[in-house]
Amino acid sequence: MARVISFSSALCWFFFFFFFSFSSLQTISQPRVNHLLTSCNNRSENFTEDSSYDTNRRSALKYLRTTSSTTPPYLSVTKGLSPDTVYGMYHCRVDITKSTCRICVRNAVTEISRSCTSQKEAFVFYEQCMVRYSDYSFFGLQELQGPNALLPSTSNFPITSRFGEKLPGKMNKLITRAASTILWPEPYFVMDKQHVNEFGSSYAVDTLVQCSPDLDPGNCTVCLRLAVQGILDCCSQSRSALNFLPKCLVRFNTSSLPPNDVVPSLGFIEGNKIFESTFIVVITASALALVGL
Ligand SMILES: *[C@@H]1O[C@H](CO)[C@@H](O)[C@H](O)[C@H]1NC(C)=O
Ligand SMILES: *[C@@H]1O[C@H](CO)[C@@H](O)[C@H](O)[C@H]1NC(C)=O
Ligand SMILES: *[C@@H]1O[C@H](CO)[C@@H](O)[C@H](O)[C@H]1NC(C)=O
Ligand SMILES: *[C@@H]1O[C@H](CO)[C@@H](O)[C@H](O)[C@H]1NC(C)=O
């Protein structure tokens, strides 16, 4: 009898550790999202806590957060009656997974509700998504005056590289393609892959251009040109860059240039270590289980 009990308790320990390590592994592999910018528009009107506007704002944000797990990369919402109507939306990059989009929107909603507690208009940009709301309908508007989040890489192409020169031409072609790609529910995007030969070797360039689906093709084009101009003005020699505007985004990234640019991938090494230590926990648990027997 005692034998049976200790066997089952050992088994319990085993499953406990197994479950524990499994859930910690899951936490490790959860997609990371990076906050870039929160902009509470202090030129917009103010609202007070628990006013009708605040209630509508909460319910709009809740709708965006809960619906992000089941819907496409773009979602808009209108809540409440005039004059306290709240208009909101989120927009995820199309090159990320649904679960990354959901986590990004969830974090963005938390961030915007915590940071913007009195302004009727607010934006939050992450590397993977954006969330906004306001007291006027912005659907279909071009909105070239809004805030934007620009994220260049810290490393640049060598000064002798011709990458920066070629960037505008390449972007223009992609913009034309994106503006004429009308596929519901996520029209207006192009993901492009290219290999460039330079310095006697080759590197890969991934480019994404994307507009919010409420724009017409003309306005999509205008927005994307502005986004590209922002990148050219600041960082055309960057190894990667993202410019996220309220209605569109542009991103490119490049693989590293061998042989002068080889850096060890720390993330991978760390991941391995974490995996190893989890593995040891499981082994220890099994050993304990055996000792218990
Ligand atoms: C309004 O926001 C801008 C930038 O977002 C900031 O520079 C300015 O100080 C703010 N003004 C007030 C009154 O908070
Ligand atoms: C909103 O409130 C801030 C102070 O909290 C004030 O500086 C600002 O002028 C107000 N904005 C409007 C549009 O009334
Ligand atoms: C772009 O949006 C504006 C409003 O923001 C609208 O007046 C215009 O007709 C739209 N279309 C084009 C092609 O600019
Ligand atoms: C660009 O970044 C994405 C991740 O967002 C990655 O999957 C892809 O391999 C990168 N492309 C290049 C050329 O490094």
Image (cartoon, grey):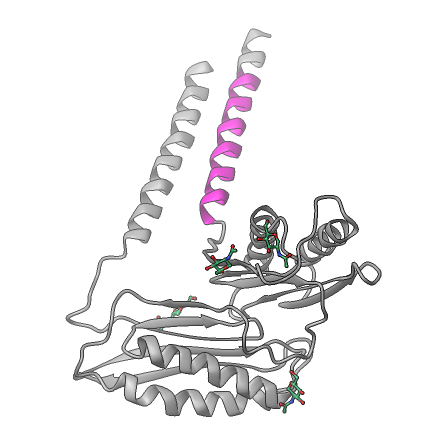
State whether residue 169 appears in this view.
Answer: yes
Residue 264, x across and y down, in percent: 23, 57
Q: Which residue lies furthest to the right in this view?
A: 81
Asked whether 293 falls inside the magenta stretch, the response is: no
Residue 225, x across and y down, in percent: 48, 85
Q: Which of 6 and 226 is in front in this view?
A: 226
In-image side of 214 versus 29 (left or right): right
State whether residue 97 appears in this view.
Answer: no
Q: Which of 147 and 273 is in front in this view?
A: 147
Residue 137, x across and y down, in percent: 72, 71
Q: Nearer the viewer, residue 254 or 136?
A: 136
Residue 246, x across and y down, in percent: 56, 71
In-image side of 289 versus 57 (left or right): left
* Boundaries of the magenta span: 7-29
Asked whether 21 falls inside the magenta stretch, the response is: yes
In-image side of 110 versus 76 (left or right): left
Please report the residue visible at 66 percent of the width from the left and 54 percent of the height from the top: 46
The quarter of the image holding the N terminus is top right
- Give residue 204's quadrant in the image: bottom left
Residue 100, compared with residue 91, is above or below; it is above
Picture quadrant of ligand 2? bottom right
Please report the residue visible at 41 percent of the width from the left and 16 percent of the height from the top: 291
Magenta span: predominant SS is helix
- Give residue 91's quadrant in the image: bottom right
Q: Which residue lies furthest to the top in this view?
A: 2
Q: Count how many numbered circles sit on residues in the image.
A: 0
Please report the residue visible at 59 percent of the width from the left and 63 percent of the height from the top: 43
